Image (spheres, coloured by chain):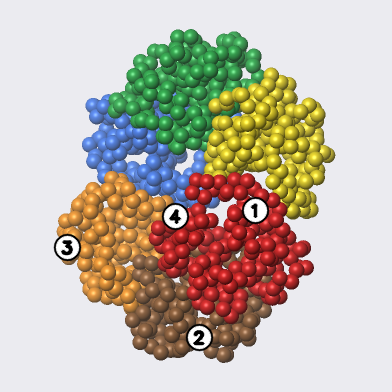
Chain colours: A orange, B blue, C green, D yellow, E red, F brown
Amino acid sequence: MFMHHITDQLSLKLIERQDADPLYRLIDANREHLREWLGWVDGTTGPDGYRDEIIPMWLTDYANGNGFACGIYFEGELVGTIALHEINQKLRQTSIGYYLTGNGRGKGLMTTVVAFITNYCFTTLDLNRVIIECAVNNTRSRKIPERLGFQQEGILRDGEILYGAYHDIAVYAMLAKDWSGMHVSTVQNQQVN
Amino acid sequence: MFMHHITDQLSLKLIERQDADPLYRLIDANREHLREWLGWVDGTTGPDGYRDEIIPMWLTDYANGNGFACGIYFEGELVGTIALHEINQKLRQTSIGYYLTGNGRGKGLMTTVVAFITNYCFTTLDLNRVIIECAVNNTRSRKIPERLGFQQEGILRDGEILYGAYHDIAVYAMLAKDWSGMHVSTVQNQQVN
Amino acid sequence: MFMHHITDQLSLKLIERQDADPLYRLIDANREHLREWLGWVDGTTGPDGYRDEIIPMWLTDYANGNGFACGIYFEGELVGTIALHEINQKLRQTSIGYYLTGNGRGKGLMTTVVAFITNYCFTTLDLNRVIIECAVNNTRSRKIPERLGFQQEGILRDGEILYGAYHDIAVYAMLAKDWSGMHVSTVQNQQVN
Amino acid sequence: MFMHHITDQLSLKLIERQDADPLYRLIDANREHLREWLGWVDGTTGPDGYRDEIIPMWLTDYANGNGFACGIYFEGELVGTIALHEINQKLRQTSIGYYLTGNGRGKGLMTTVVAFITNYCFTTLDLNRVIIECAVNNTRSRKIPERLGFQQEGILRDGEILYGAYHDIAVYAMLAKDWSGMHVSTVQNQQVN
Amino acid sequence: MFMHHITDQLSLKLIERQDADPLYRLIDANREHLREWLGWVDGTTGPDGYRDEIIPMWLTDYANGNGFACGIYFEGELVGTIALHEINQKLRQTSIGYYLTGNGRGKGLMTTVVAFITNYCFTTLDLNRVIIECAVNNTRSRKIPERLGFQQEGILRDGEILYGAYHDIAVYAMLAKDWSGMHVSTVQNQQVN
Amino acid sequence: MFMHHITDQLSLKLIERQDADPLYRLIDANREHLREWLGWVDGTTGPDGYRDEIIPMWLTDYANGNGFACGIYFEGELVGTIALHEINQKLRQTSIGYYLTGNGRGKGLMTTVVAFITNYCFTTLDLNRVIIECAVNNTRSRKIPERLGFQQEGILRDGEILYGAYHDIAVYAMLAKDWSGMHVSTVQNQQVN
């Protein structure tokens, strides 16, 4: 039920148990290309795992102030998800994970969404550092932090495992002090509570 | 961050830790009239209790699929709260609690909000029965279920305790089968996910 | 082992694990009429569930000062049970549940037992309000609170579910201040520790 | 509330929170002689520790089928306690602890009570071995197992600590096979459920 | 990885998950004679139970300062184990359990190991009393405490159960004050941290 | 008590509660230079925190197969510590943390110790990747992975916080496949169980 409207067409919705069916259908209809970079796709065989385990886990993280997972809606249609993974309170940092599929692709939506979430991390959550980690060969995904001015800080060798094979991971980060000086998009002028 | 817009002017926001300050200020500015029917007002002496205990408890209920607590915003200003208390899965029932204050009063806002939440309980959560309990002498509060066609089912004697004194409680309830036949407001036509 | 003798013939025994067998036999021998108003009867298929789950749960409630479940014995024979369900410390209230079967019926035993337990709630546990809830059509059960002067406070529509069908529930309650003025039976003169 | 009547004059009552006051008064009035063999007496400075910690712990043991603690009542007056400590299910054994004071002493009450509890252990709980451990110099206490035919199996050196000083402990035990052949008292003919 | 070298040939190693395989092989190769006095041998049917349940439980005891289990290595080969069972902090006492097999037997190794552990209990752990319990008919095992000057304090009848049959248990103990006066072996001169 | 001897002079000891005092004394005697790169030094004001919280936490990690903390001993004297932090089972990776002080410095000890632990991670724990993270300006610490052939993979900006100020972190890693081809030291020929 609970949403945030980034633009008229683009919104985020906190994922609840009743979203298990549409979320599973999204994965199921896009297995082919999602499984390339998401290791859990093959293990996702029905909506029950979402309803009974994964969504409750996401909501518990949210209740603990330790991140959240949102559906991305374009013109009312679920086209992907974005999540904050674990908020390190000592270092005031977190990392963002996301995927987009089907009708959502090729419109620059993810750049807008990630810009919004990054801004939210600095402005509302008062964090110092936002990380995005992408497999080195996941060119599509790497373009998002690059477009938004995140700095590539290194390559963690064998930092991810997909279907039994290791992949190197590019680490991008944005610091609060750098973000405020950028003018990536209008989202930065939004004050979110 | 996560909201539901009921009308252009009226919205609900899932209460998060960062709402502790405005929520406390709302209570603090309206102690006089809120304390009449809310037993916890005198014990609310700062925002920390909200941030560290009460809001985390509400969010944990939400994560467990066991209700939630929302701020009510009118033209962007926090004017009250509404909550679902504990969802009884066996009986498919819940109860609604609410208060409105200051600038929110006298505009019929609460009737709209309760109609929306009641509709959400039947339509999205698929519940069978929605309860509203009001102290017998709380005339203002009792008008809400009465306007919306809830049926008064009884008076529970000494069913609430406020500042050491017992009060009788009027129990109102709406059943799913009765709600669908009513045309209380346009909210019933909304499909919420 | 631990009992309370209400009269020479009538006593209550705190149900322990070793009572699982006789308790199951009582249910099993009376399925026909018990299942009419007790939703759990069909699911009771052997003594193990009592021994390993239900009785330990009752005893844990008892250990937590949150109610208890007793067997009702007439002339040494187990004829039913009576329980206090969850004690609400803030409101100083509880509710009583009971059933009687076979040889125990038709002797007015349950009225005596409920009078005793009600008196115990007010006198020893110092509660303010004792509730009895009965399905509206369960005439036999409703006679108990009516005979003892409990006041019917309302009818909760669809307040119980039995075998997939909702039933309305009559709510009866006795308040401490009213009880002390009544002279229902000699049990009121007993001081129990 | 829950008792077992061993004889007309002598009964055991499962200790509940509401017994904290009389239990504390019993200890307080008999500190002098109780502290000689009970290490916790000096630390018992009011009824709250009983009500909030010790009695709940005893009741939790009882709920877990792991022993219990009873008050001993003579002619309606609390004169001591008896407890089963931890039931070892693998070895089917437990141990008994007890004390008697003031008006209860010198009447042979404890022998009757321990005979009853021992019999209960073998008959109802189906145990194989019942242990009684007494400080070597606690002559009064050692007489109980000796009168009942328990066999002294050894002396555990430094097996107890009282006020910083170690004491040797005499271990007595009764086996099920030996008990059934004895005719210690009429309690053995009682069948307790 | 973590060891203590008692002599050049004899060492103890804290048992870790990666020791599950060799530990199981040791048991499996010596089932015949081990099962005579160790009740768990027949239930040990593979290394998984060690890796997933028993070794983690031992390590958790160790983490809680409540004993430990070590492999005994002679010339680099695992030949048995020795454990401290539960440390009673109030009484400052513990008990030692051990077995040796195959190539380890007949060399006096266990006497050296038990002398070392006993000394460690008194010197490093600052305990007051160390207990060794052996089945009465386990002559080989009883020789260890007897050689080391432990005093036999009694025979606990039916104190152990093996394959459904009870066995009497001989209780041996050493007190700190007696140990320091003995000159059992050179291990007493070792200071272990 | 439990150690691993890397060379005749150099050993690791699993840190236990009884090491709290020497560990605290080591920190206390070297506060000046340790606090430069270790944020917790100022908060370490006595041995109790080690004994009651930190060491039990380390041992619990060890019991859970999730790393460990060892004291480093040179010629029998405690000169520093080394720890494995959290073992990521999915990625088969961990990270190493260490410090050396006083008499331990300037002898190349830490290079030997880290080589040993790295080898242990690959050989015994069968990990794929070992990480060492050092503050960019901590030249002394960075020399260890550099000498051992770890590859610097990046600089995480603001990846550590010390006394309220952020520091950039150099990330070094060794992969299993690279390690086996190196001949850093003789430690690689050791087989540790």
Look at mark 2 in the image and give the residue it sits on: F112
The part of the image, by quadrant, that contains residue E99 is bottom right
Q: Determine if marks 3 and 2 fall on one subunit.
A: no
Kind of residue at badge 2: Thr
Task: Give the x, y percent position of residue D48.
Answer: 69, 38
Marked residue chain, label 4: E
Q: Earlier in the sequence, mark 4 or mark 1?
A: 4
Distance Cα–Cα, label 3 vs label 2: 48 Å
Lateral position of residue C100 relative to residue A80, left or right: right
Q: Is residue F20 visible?
A: no
Distance Cα–Cα, label 1 vs label 2: 50 Å
Q: Are marks 1 and 2 in contact (CB under 8 Å)?
A: no
Look at mark 1 in the image and give the residue it sits on: E170
Kind of residue at badge 3: Glu
Going 38% across and 20% down the picture, which residue do you hit?
C29
Lateral position of residue B168 relative to residue F55, left or right: left
Lateral position of residue B126 relative to residue C87, left or right: left
What is the secondary structure assignment of the residue under circle 3? helix
Q: Are marks 4 and 1 in contact (CB under 8 Å)?
A: no
Look at mark 4 in the image and give the residue it sits on: E42
Of badges 3 and 2, nearer the viewer stands 2
What is the secondary structure assignment of the residue under circle 2? helix
Kind of residue at badge 4: Asp
* Viewer-closest of D181 and A22: D181
Marked residue chain, label 1: E
Mark 1 Cα-neighbour bin, 10 Å: few <14, some 14–19, many ≥20: many
What is the secondary structure assignment of the residue under circle 4? loop
Mark 2 Cα-neighbour bin, 10 Å: few <14, some 14–19, many ≥20: many
* Viewer-closest of D193 and F4: D193
Going 69% across and 46% down the picture, which residue do you hit?
D153
Task: Give the x, y percent position of residue E82.
Answer: 57, 64
